[in-house]
Image (cartoon, grey):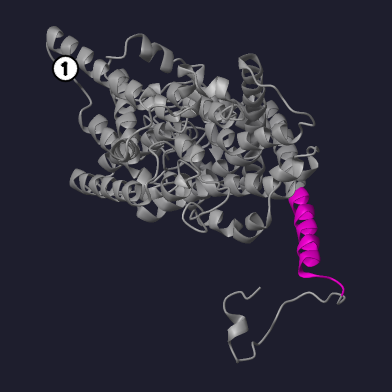
Amino acid sequence: MDCFGLGRTSVVPSSLFGICAPSECSEQDLSTRLGESIRVLDLALCAVILSLCLVGTIADVLLSFTRSSTRPVDKSNEYLPVTNDSMEIDDTREANAPNILGSNKQNGCRRTRDKPETTSLISRSLPVDHFQPRRGRTLLDFFLCFSLIKNTSSIMDTEVRPGSITSIHGMRVLSMWWVVLGHCDEVVTVPTFVNRFTAEAVVNATLSVDTFFVLSGLLVAYVSLRRMEKSNGKLPIFQFYFHRIYRLTPTYMFVLLFYAKLLGFFSEGPLWFKYQTNEECDKHWWTNLLYINNIYPGKDERWFSHIHRFRLKGLLTIVGFLMCSSFISTAAIYSHYDVRGTPFSSLLSGEDASNLVYVKPYCRIAPYLVGLTLGYLLQHKREFKGSKMRMYLFSVTGWCVAVALAVTTLYGPEKDDRLLKRHPFTHAGDVIYGTFGRFAWSLATAWVIFACHHGLGGFVKKILSARFWIPLSRLTYCTYLVHIIAINTLSGSFKTMITYNDIHMAFIFAGVLVIAYAAAFIVSVCVEFPIMELENLIFTKRN
């Protein structure tokens, strides 16, 4: 393969790297051999991670015995009191928001150095874990980042901090369930299922991704604006981007490497070869690392992270301009290529709507911009007051409009999606729905968040803000990454034809969901959370 144009130059390079092999070996044989070596490295990486988790957990257990003892405070030893004055939404594990100021935080708490006169007011005999010495703890702190006990407690913590947008936890979990339901889509080609009105909740499950776009834009704007307010308008751009990339990439690459090189050992069956990665994955894996795989090469199966998109800044005028640009470009694509209005109807007609519209940032940016605008409003409109009658009318009107938008978007293309297609959309209908359908859904989603945050949610707020959602919410990112592995493993292991019905679909969905969350928990405590703890440790030591 001619990489970087080396085969087109007449200048002899100073060095070349290659593989000496017998002439009988083909390029495919060498690729296979290299793939086997990468599998060994993948297994070695898993072994290293598990070893670090074991050492970190043992260190945490041993350290817990010393924490039960007490000793006087020595001002000369430079202790860091761990306070509980953390920001309203400071924990990226539960908010997926950037730690843009690089503040000293660990376990959801900000560390600040007290002045001597302040420290002297603290009790002279406190548990050791209230204070941590700055020197001589680097190696121990490194291993503690991998402690399974520590990371599990971080996931299971249900503390709600003042000012948190609590409804996002339930919304994130339910949307993740919807994503899994939509990907358990073996039944979508069964006429007896698809031709039912209730099937639209499965057929149009792609709307769940737009909910994540709204949440992502909301949290980026809301958290960034609050931190800018506390830092006199300063926003360290480098740390902002670094945190987002660092937050997502290691876990993303770990799961992708596992999927590409180790999934083949997990099952077998007559269709198993169909679900294993192909040459395109081996050739273009680097596009995932650069987060351009939804643009290049733009075909076959794509992995993309719904929360690593469109980090934008600017005034609402820029948001409006980008929104209009997205509408124009999306409408032009639907009109020029005569694409059907929904991904499923396009699939039935044999069109490549996914490659043309579904994965393109310029066509999917509208929900993210709605989230940015909502974050701006929640930050600058912290209190929403009025007369009782005015608030009642405002609430009723908002909920009616939101329900109308959501129902129309979800069930509007019901006749168009049916296999019989007796009443398909017109060309104009396809353009209108394809351009504005996801925007309408994002407006309905934004209203639910806005209403719940300002006390207009009623029982909806009670459901979405329940604390039992919080641990599952923290597992959303890893669940999003690993659930497709569970689905492919199940589908590829079938040795006979399956007759689908509602009960069968329910059991498949429930089984995949449980397995996905179990696998996500393992990846979170072993990879995702240690990576975030290492970031906190690095910035703490540097500061």
Q: Quadrant of residue 319?
A: top left
Q: Residue at x 75, y 37 (%)?
A: 54
In front: 456, or 529? 456
The quadrant of the rendering that contains the N terminus is bottom right
- Residue 388 colored in magenta in the image: no
Helix, strand or loop at mark 1? loop
| 199 versus 521 height, above or below | above
| 90 versus 30 height, above or below | above
Q: Residue at x 45, y 47 (%)?
A: 244
Q: Which residues are magenta?
A: 24-44
Task: Count residues near mark 1 (Cα–Cα under 10 Å), then give few for <14, some for 14-19, many for 20+.
Answer: few
Q: Main secondary structure of the magenta part?
A: helix
| 26 versus 339 height, above or below | below
Q: Quadrant of residue 478?
A: top right
Q: Position of residue 349 (x, y in %)?
A: 48, 40
In front: 505, or 138? 505
Q: Position of residue 461 (x, y in %)?
A: 36, 14
Let me know if residue 150 appears in the view: no
Let me know if residue 294 appears in the view: yes
Q: Which residue is mark 1?
A: 385
- Residue 37 colored in magenta in the image: yes
Q: Position of residue 198 (x, y in %)?
A: 47, 17
User: In this image, 199 relative to 427: left or right?
Assistant: right
Q: Position of residue 159 (x, y in %)?
A: 47, 21
Amino acid type, mark 1: Lys
Q: Residue at x 52, y 58 (%)?
A: 297
